[in-house]
């Protein structure tokens, strides 16, 4: 009997244009005893060829398959949960994974054990290592927000591998185990499209008194290439405007643009246009916030009549 059968666990794997990485992820989930008929691969590839390859891989592994329009990572995850529920496959907890995450065989059992230790836990994640370097280079041990500008930053410190779950401000969305009711009631915000959606959700959960934890004994790997500059500017501003204030967002984006420029001048890393891309993304975020405010005002006006 698999972990998923015995402990009420379903699984959503979000796939985009990378069928070459999908078999290894599904094999790792199988080794972790969570691959089952309650696993759905949600594909939002733009290419029909990539999508059909992903379908064949998913079905050969005994998984369900759902193709959706590319509206971002959060939308794919939300669609996957709705799909499982519509099939009568809703479970108490749901594992959310990217198409290239590689959990170690005991990772999910350890995440589940964390939930059993405290009912306040809403989401748990493993230590994340760069692909091919498990056991050495940690790229995320959960996340924090900087003190003044509330910029998301990864913890990369080593933890006691036998230690209890550690509270974090947020977890990277590469591989996370949720209480299903959390994703139904609080939801991943689809307006980010890609990056920051998990940060937003986890900060909101903490404000509701729920715990967001990293489990030191659970390990997984994934490649990490950072966030594109335009999306950094856009989504950092959206995050700040929504959960803190627009002015804090402007300061945070300005800091990131200046930091990018300084890095290029001093170390010659990155590209000159990165700073301009960050600013361009910020302006896009400003437009999005203004459009949302106008939409809210129109809804209030309609309800008054």
Image (tube, grey):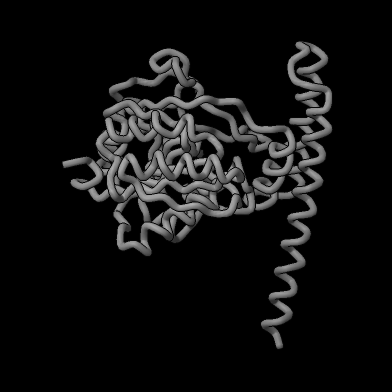
Q: Is residue 305 visible?
A: yes
Total marks shown come to 0
Residue placed furthest toward the left:
1
Q: Is residue 252 above or below residue 102?
A: below
Q: Quadrant of the C terminus?
A: bottom right
Q: Nearer the viewer, residue 244 or 43?
A: 43
- The quadrant in which the N terminus is found is top left
Q: Position of residue 73 (x, y in %)?
A: 55, 46
Residue 284: x %, y % from top left: 78, 48
Q: Is residue 212 visible?
A: no
Q: Is residue 188 above or below residue 57?
A: below
Q: Is residue 123 above or below residue 141?
A: below
Residue found at the very far bottom of the displayed protein: 305
**Horizontal side of residue 230 vs 119, given as left or right:** right
Asked if residue 42 lies left or right of residue 6, the reply is: right
**Above-or-below relation of 206 to 230:** below
Task: Report x, y in % for residue 267.
Answer: 76, 11
Q: Residue at x 46, y 41 (%)?
A: 54
Q: Which is more toward the observer, 76 or 43?
A: 43
Residue drawn where x is 64% and y is 32% of the image = 227
Residue 201 in percent (x, y) is at: 52, 48
Relative to the observer, which residue lies in front, 292 or 209?
A: 292
Q: Residue at x 32, y 40 (%)?
A: 61
Left of 244 or right of it: where is 89?
A: left
């Amino acid at each position: 009997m698999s972990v998923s059968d015995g402990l009420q666990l379903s699984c959503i794997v979000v796939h985009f244009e990378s069928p070459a990485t999908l078999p290894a992820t599904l094999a790792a989930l199988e080794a972790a005893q969570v691959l089952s008929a309650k696993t759905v691969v949600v594909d939002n590839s733009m290419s029909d060829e990539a999508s059909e390859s992903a379908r064949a891989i998913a079905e050969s592994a005994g998984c369900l398959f759902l193709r959706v329009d590319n509206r971002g990572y959060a939308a794919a995850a939300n669609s996957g949960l709705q799909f499982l529920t519509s099939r009568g496959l809703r479970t108490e907890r749901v594992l959310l994974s990217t198409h290239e995450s590689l959990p170690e065989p005991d990772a999910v059992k350890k995440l589940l054990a964390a939930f059993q230790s405290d009912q306040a836990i809403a989401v748990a994640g493993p230590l994340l290592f760069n692909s091919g370097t498990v056991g050495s280079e940690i790229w995320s041990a959960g996340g924090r927000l900087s003190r003044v500008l509330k910029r998301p930053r990864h913890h990369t410190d080593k933890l006691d591998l036998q230690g209890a779950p550690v509270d974090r401000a947020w977890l990277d969305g590469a591989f996370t185990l949720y209480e299903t009711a959390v994703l139904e009631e609080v939801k991943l915000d689809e307006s980010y499209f890609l990056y920051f959606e998990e940060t937003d959700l986890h900060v909101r959960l903490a404000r509701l008194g729920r715990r967001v934890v990293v489990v030191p004994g659970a390990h997984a790997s994934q490649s990490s290439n950072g966030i594109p500059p335009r999306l950094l500017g856009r989504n950092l501003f959206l995050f700040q405007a929504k959960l803190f204030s627009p002015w804090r967002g402007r300061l945070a984006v300005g800091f990131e643009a200046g930091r990018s420029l300084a890095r290029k001048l001093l170390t010659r890393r990155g590209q000159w246009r990165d700073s301009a891309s960050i600013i361009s993304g910020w302006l896009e975020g400003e437009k999005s916030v203004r459009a949302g405010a106008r939409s809210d005002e129109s809804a209030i006006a309609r309800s008054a009549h």
